[in-house]
Amino acid sequence: MNKTLKILIIMICSIAILSGVVFAAFKIYENLQGEAEMKPTFTGNIQEGNGNVETGAISSNKVWVGTFNLAWNELMEEVTKEPVEFEEGNSAIVDELNKQTFTKEMLNENSYPLHLRHLSLKTQELLEITKMKYHILF
């Protein structure tokens, strides 16, 4: 094989590899553009991609923190003694959390701290001031 042919083959292979890398980088960038979706519970399959498990791609950013589920469950077990209901009606998140799909029984007892304390009157007043100042609705 002559020198010109070798250079041509190397250039074609380099262009093909570079094109693949650039294409992959753009696809990753596109998937990271959306904001992360806050989920109260994780009920899906990590391999879901646009509703099709066979694609093996994650279609969007998802954030799930199991500790909030544990705190909500503790609220239901120790304070309300039943599913939490709001006077204004429940949101989809509240309904999902009330299902208790993630519980402390699913974890090793030594893997998380869980403490339930009632708030002092001063702390409750501070929370109310903070809610009004920052227009927090909870």
Image (cartoon, rainbow, N blue to C red):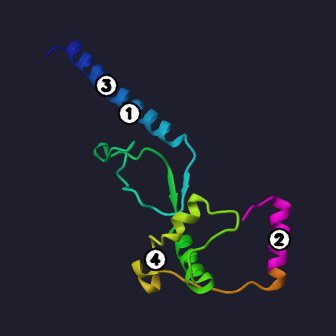
**Amino acid at pointer 3:** Ala
Magenta residue span: 124-138
Of 48 and 6, the residue lying toward us: 48
Q: Position of residue 84 (x, y in %)?
A: 60, 73
What residue did someone put label 3 on?
Answer: 16
Q: Secondary structure at mark 4?
A: loop
Q: Residue at x 79, y 86 (%)?
A: 120
Of 77 and 129, the residue lying toward us: 77
What residue did someone put label 4 on?
Answer: 103
What residue did someone put label 2 on?
Answer: 128
Q: Position of residue 97 (x, y in %)?
A: 53, 68
Distance, label 3 to label 1, CA atoms, is 9 Å
For this orientation, the residue located farthest to the left is 1
Query: Magenta stretch containing residue 77, yes or no?
Result: no
Contact check, label 1 and label 4, Cβ < 8 Å? no
Distance, label 1 to label 4, CA atoms, is 42 Å
Specify the quadrant of the image occupied by residue 46.
Answer: bottom left
User: Mark 3 or mark 2, which is nearer the start of the sequence?
Assistant: 3
Of 118 and 109, the residue lying toward us: 118
Q: Residue at x 74, y 84 (%)?
A: 119
- As drawn, the label of residue 21 is 1
Query: Magenta stretch containing residue 134, yes or no?
Result: yes
Within 10 angstroms of label 2, few (less than 14), some, or many (20 or more) residues? few
Contact check, label 3 and label 4, Cβ < 8 Å? no
Q: Position of residue 31 (x, y in %)?
A: 48, 40
